[in-house]
Image (cartoon, grey):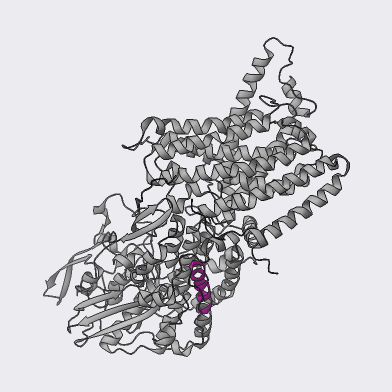
């Protein structure tokens, strides 16, 4: 009954089971485990559909439209096709590593959703260090990717895996520093508290942080223009060149589950999470996730891919100093009490700072393609 | 502490997403850096030069379609020029104009693919490629109207063209000419100033003018290095001396310049078509040529500026119905000779875009 | 100060792609929607006119692939050839059109048909009876402009997409 009320009205602090019920914790756990897994799988199907159709229209074609009404069943058809395919393991592969890699990559992508609030208090575990947990967990899938690259005993895979590790190690830092700005303003590490603290979306207070997080997040999950690890025109398919059948399906799932995860984190941290007028919170949340994902599809459709040394230079020479400066300015503003008292001044100042910093930094300190770094 | 490393060999191709067909490179890599490459080809060898020795002069034209299959009309043109030189055939005026229009349209179509594939190699996920295919489709539509086929046109004949243009061709071409500049502006808006593309392509894979001449590179690759050499201007064949057009060149000779060079050449081709459409006379389109040509004993070399460079056909006749020897100078193969020097020291990703910027067709390399 | 390197190029590119999202796509749904093919279409089949053919064999001599097989007998009474066997292996045929151009008696045409896929290679060989003109097998206007006039006009992409850019 509570669930029905909640879906209908979207009011109040959500609790699936009243905590004074016997075994309430376990019911909560069971309910949200099912919800999270179901959410991830359906969202992955949804974003695959959005990506293929949206990209198709942007490329002046239709995209898949034969399976089901408007091609809605295309992800299902893809899944069935890929699951029925033969599972080929190269003769020289490290069999155990090759077999384990998709699992190692997939688990963290799913685990991120444990702390994403779908509504006020509606999350599997309201950790008071939620965002820290995400940062810690999200880099674990790199291990899976590297296992895949190493285990396949293919040179393309190895190149892709090396690129992935290099990129993730570098991009973690600006990613975390961009998050810290938000955490300073919200005054909490808990994902739910961060959303509750957003009277206006933090993208207005942290425009630079948002851009940094978007760029670093795209690099973290191999979305274009940072998709060097599976750059199909260079290294065939990167780390999953030698995967087929079910294991390939797992990697495909990981790729999109991570994209959904980053979209969900962006919309929780910067876009006000589940907050929104009229519609129920979970719907707002899904709409925002889809919008962020659409922005990723849009950039993927338009932009060329950057090179590995430019990728590293971009992280260390552009994103990293910018993140530090952003953090410093935010800290000063928080110290002066701006987020509560002088919110409008803060919005204006931060947008001005963003424009100024991007211009100055790209004019005098860093330009894409300046010099070369050996990696 | 110095880490002990060793180079490793990567076999790129023959089946690889961006080797433009069945082309193979043995790449020696030091990490991501290319130490050495060795192109390996012959996977698409069909023995066209040998086959040509057993066919009639007219029967070779369908074979030339299959050399550089994305610019068939130009191949026909070069071959027909060689045969006409060999047999001393005079081509009617209207046929010359039709040839020029068709050949320039084909140049635009082929350059669209070249640019699209290059941008695709840079990683712009199929968007420019599909946009450019859309326009190529319009050109191919016009060719279908003229010749009845969409890829292997087999339209030109020794002594003219196979049939006159249908009457709906020129109005349709007019429409195409009106919309094409807008599309080209759109491509420029899409990626010309793109920061990532500039970072990727500017200064990458520089081919100095001197080396380009030494390797006898031709076509857009040569002109992007700053050498003003265009057979249409410097050794005018057909009626190219009647048209007013520029030979654009670029200063640096890097990948970005080669991309810009191709876009500029498309604009010049549009200019030529525009003038040819105004001047085209009426009249016969095919000289009185017997079905089986017996050219006098001798040899002839017909060459044209095809979208990839200088395409030449060298024919030796022994007064029979088939040439004694037919040799082809494929621009792709000769442009490829500079690849090794251009890519050494660059990364794998650069190797791909430098290779893409040379714009080869494997059908022509292997013949 | 030139704003070349500050993301302006990226922003321009993004506007181009988002504008295409709202535009009509340039594709057509093939088995349901069909465009008219060219009047001069060089189809997969050839059409042979039994009455006009004199059995001279020019087509077979011209064919660069050697896909045409013609066997004739002499009819002494009428003083002409009888075509005993006329076969075209469309599997070998490259649709170059040289035979149609070579025929001195206008007895050989291209068909306006496409979708001539078969399951077996043997079925690709067209015999005499399969080469006659029928309502299903229309004659293409390749090399015969008077025949081309009777066919429907080609659908052109230049005319289909007219929106402003």
Q: Residue B161 placed where, x, y %? A: 37, 80
Q: Which residues are magenta?
A: B252-268
Residue that protrudes farthest toward the front in the picture: B1
A190 up-or-down from C2: above or below: above
Q: Residue at x 56, y 31 (%)?
A: A108
Q: Residue at x 44, y 79 (%)?
A: B165
Quadrant showing the N terminus of chain C: bottom right
Q: Residue at x 80, y 44 (%)?
A: A332
Query: Along the line of sight, which residue is nearer the eye, A83 or A164?
Result: A164
Q: Residue B301 placed where, x, y %? A: 29, 83
> Residue A21: which quarter of the image?
top right
Left or right of C51, for residue B167: right
B269 up-or-down from A77: above or below: below
Query: Along the line of sight, which residue is nearer the eye, A312 or A27?
Result: A312
Quadrant showing the C terminus of chain C: bottom right
A202 up-or-down from B190: above or below: above
Residue A3 makes an appearance in the image: yes
Q: Residue A106 placed where, x, y %? A: 52, 32
Left or right of A332, for residue A96: left
> Residue B324: which quarter of the image?
bottom left
- Main SS of the magenta part reads helix
Query: Along the line of sight, which residue is nearer the eye, C145 or B253?
Result: B253
Residue that protrudes farthest toward the left in the picture: C76
Q: Residue B168 placed where, x, y %? A: 50, 76
Q: Is residue A155 magenta?
A: no
Q: Is residue B260 magenta?
A: yes
Residue that protrudes farthest toward the top in the picture: A22
């Amino acid at each position: 009954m509570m669930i029905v009320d909640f879906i209908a009205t979207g009011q109040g602090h959500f609790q699936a089971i009243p905590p004074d019920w016997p075994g309430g914790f376990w019911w909560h756990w069971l309910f949200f485990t099912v919800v999270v897994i179901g959410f991830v799988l359906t969202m992955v199907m949804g974003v695959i559909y959005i990506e293929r159709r949206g990209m198709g229209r942007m490329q002046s074609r239709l995209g898949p439209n034969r399976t089901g009404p408007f091609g809605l069943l295309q992800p299902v058809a893809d899944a069935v096709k890929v699951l029925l395919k033969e599972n080929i393991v190269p003769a020289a592969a490290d069999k155990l590593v090759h077999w384990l890699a998709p699992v190692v990559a997939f688990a963290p992508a799913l685990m991120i959703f444990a702390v994403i609030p779908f509504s006020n208090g509606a999350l599997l575990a309201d950790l008071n260090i939620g965002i820290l947990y995400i940062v810690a967990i999200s880099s674990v899938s790199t291990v899976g990717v590297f296992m895949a690259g190493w285990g396949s005993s293919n040179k393309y895979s190895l190149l892709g895996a090396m690129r992935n590790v290099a990129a993730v190690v570098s991009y973690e830092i600006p990613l975390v520093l961009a998050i810290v700005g938000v955490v300073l303003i919200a005054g909490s590490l808990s994902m739910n508290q961060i959303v509750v603290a957003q009277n206006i979306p933090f993208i207005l207070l942290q425009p630079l942080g948002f851009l940094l997080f978007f760029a670093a997040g795209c690099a973290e999950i191999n979305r274009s223009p940072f998709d060097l690890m599976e750059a199909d025109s260079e290294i065939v398919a990167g780390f999953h060149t030698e995967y087929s059948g079910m294991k390939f399906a797992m990697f495909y799932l990981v790729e999109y589950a991570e994209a959904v995860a980053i979209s969900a984190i962006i919309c929780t941290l910067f876009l006000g999470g589940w907050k929104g007028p009229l519609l129920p919170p979970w719907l707002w949340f899904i709409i925002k996730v889809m919008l962020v994902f659409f922005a990723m599809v849009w950039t993927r459709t338009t932009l060329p891919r950057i090179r590995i040394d430019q990728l590293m230079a971009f992280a260390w020479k552009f994103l990293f100093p910018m993140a530090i400066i952003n953090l410093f300015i935010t800290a000063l503003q928080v110290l002066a009490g701006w987020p509560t008292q002088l919110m409008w001044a803060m919005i204006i100042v931060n947008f001005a700072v963003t424009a100024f910093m991007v211009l100055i930094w790209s004019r005098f300190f860093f330009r894409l393609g300046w010099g070369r770094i050996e990696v | 502490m110095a880490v002990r490393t060793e180079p490793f060999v990567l076999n790129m191709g023959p089946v690889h997403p961006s080797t433009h067909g069945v082309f193979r490179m043995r790449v020696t890599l030091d990490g991501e850096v290319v130490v050495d490459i060795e192109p390996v080809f012959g996977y698409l060898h069909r023995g066209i030069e040998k086959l040509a020795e057993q066919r009639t002069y007219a029967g070779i034209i369908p074979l030339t379609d299959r050399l550089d299959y994305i610019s068939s009309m130009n191949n026909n043109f070069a071959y027909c020029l060689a045969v006409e030189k060999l047999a001393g055939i005079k081509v009617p005026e209207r046929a010359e104009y039709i040839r020029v229009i068709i050949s320039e349209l084909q140049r635009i179509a082929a350059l669209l693919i070249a640019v699209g594939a290059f941008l695709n190699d840079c990683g712009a996920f199929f968007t420019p490629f599909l946009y450019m295919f859309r326009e190529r489709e319009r050109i191919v539509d016009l060719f279908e109207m003229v010749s009845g086929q969409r890829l292997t046109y087999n339209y030109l004949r020794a002594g003219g063209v196979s049939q006159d243009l249908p009457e709906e061709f020129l109005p349709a071409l007019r429409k195409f000419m009106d919309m094409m500049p807008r599309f080209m502006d759109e491509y420029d808006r899409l990626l010309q100033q793109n920061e990532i593309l500039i970072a990727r392509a500017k200064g990458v894979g520089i081919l100095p003018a001197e080396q380009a001449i030494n390797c006898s590179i031709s076509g857009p690759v040569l002109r992007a290095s700053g050498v003003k050499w265009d057979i249409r201007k410097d050794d005018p064949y057909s009626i190219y001396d009647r048209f007013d057009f520029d030979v654009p060149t670029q200063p640096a000779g890097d990948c970005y310049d080669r991309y810009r060079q191709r876009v500029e050449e498309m604009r010049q081709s549009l200019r030529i078509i525009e003038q040819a459409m105004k001047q085209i006379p009426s009249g016969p389109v095919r000289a009185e040529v017997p079905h089986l040509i017996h050219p006098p004993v001798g040899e002839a070399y017909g060459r044209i500026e095809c979208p990839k460079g200088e395409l030449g056909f060298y024919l030796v006749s022994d007064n029979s119905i088939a040439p004694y020897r037919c040799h082809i100078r494929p621009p792709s193969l000769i442009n490829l000779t500079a690849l090794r020097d251009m890519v050494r020291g660059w990364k794998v990703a650069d190797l791909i875009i430098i290779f893409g910027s040379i714009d080869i067709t494997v059908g022509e390399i292997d013949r | 100060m030139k704003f070349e390197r500050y993301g302006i190029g990226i922003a321009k590119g993004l506007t181009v792609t988002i504008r295409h999202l709202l535009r009509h796509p340039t594709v057509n749904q093939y088995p349901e929607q069909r465009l008219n093919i060219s009047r001069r279409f060089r189809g997969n089949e050839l059409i042979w006119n039994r009455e006009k053919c004199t059995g001279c064999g020019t087509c077979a001599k011209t064919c660069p692939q050697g896909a045409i097989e013609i066997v004739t007998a002499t009819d002494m009474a009428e003083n002409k050839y009888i075509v005993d066997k006329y076969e075209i292996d469309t599997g070998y045929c490259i649709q170059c059109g040289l035979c149609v151009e070579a025929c001195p008696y206008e007895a050989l045409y291209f068909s306006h048909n496409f979708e001539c896929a078969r399951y077996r290679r043997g079925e690709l060989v067209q015999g005499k009876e399969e080469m006659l003109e029928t309502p299903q097998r229309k004659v293409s206007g390749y090399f015969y402009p008077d025949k081309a006039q009777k066919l429907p006009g080609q659908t052109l992409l230049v005319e289909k997409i007219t929106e402003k850019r």
